[in-house]
Amino acid sequence: MFTGIIEQLGEVVALKKEGKNVHLSLKSAITNELKIDQSIAHNGVCLTVVDIKDDGYIVTAINETLKKSNLSLLQVGSKVNLERSMKIGARIDGHMVQGHVDQTAICTDIEEEEGSYRLTFKHEKLDNITVEKGSICINGVSLTVVNSKDTSFSVAIIPYTFEHTNFHAFKIGTVVNIEFDILGKYIAKMFINDL
């Protein structure tokens, strides 16, 4: 479990394909605090550390993960939002995030609003829902939904979050990972099963 509060940006330094899997090598300021078998969210995707060397570490993304997320679009030099799993007994500053990306979305608008940013995203209509003032996780970042529609929504972002995550590199057309709120997913599932 995660909270959607990004600790660091990691940088992809190598990609190695093996069958349908991709081994991602990253470097980060928190590498020296990691251990093998540890779960870390990469752009919101929970991946396991399989090797550590100097200031770099390796995680593996399987085909299912690559199909559901934007990890298949990463290149050497890409910046990735990183968060280690939450500690029991610590404050949850964001919301309960599983690290299980539901689908991707596309950034359709970026507006600067006198000190903050409003980003709009469009996604394919599946069984997932957003609600006004509900939680959403974008590239691993816990955010609040505004302007909720069936296949789109916006979020308002403070400058700190914009500058300290990979959001500052977003453009129109950027593909992001979306994890919808777990409570909303359960409610939607119960509602659909009752029809």
Image (spheres, grey):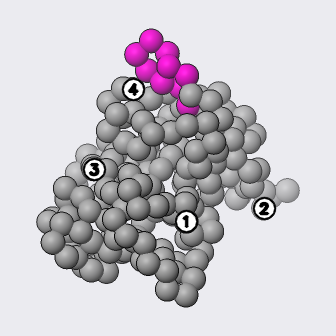
Q: Quadrant of residue 34?
A: bottom left
Left or right: 128, with 146 as reference point: right
Q: Amino acid at mark 1?
A: Ser
Query: In this rendering, does residue 3 appear at all?
Result: no
Sequence-first tag of 1 and 4:
1
| Residue that label 4 marks | 158
- Secondary element under disc 2, as helix, strand or loop, is helix
Give me the residue at 85% from left, 56% from top: 195
- Secondary element under disc 3, as helix, strand or loop, is strand
Is residue 117 rendered magenta in the image?
A: yes
Q: CA distance from mark 1 to mark 2?
A: 33 Å
- Residue 117: image x %, image y %? 48, 24
Query: In this rendering, does residue 93 appear at all?
Result: yes
Magenta range:
111-119
Which class describes the residues within 10 Å of circle 1: few (<14), some (14-19), or many (20+)? some
Q: Quadrant of residue 147?
A: top right
Q: CA distance from mark 1 to mark 4?
A: 28 Å
Give me the residue at 57% from left, 83% from top: 20
* Quadrant in the picture for the N terminus: bottom left
Q: CA distance from mark 3 to mark 4?
A: 17 Å
| Residue that label 3 marks | 8
Which class describes the residues within 10 Å of circle 4: few (<14), some (14-19), or many (20+)? few
User: Is 48 placed above or below 8 here?
Assistant: below
| Residue that label 1 marks | 72
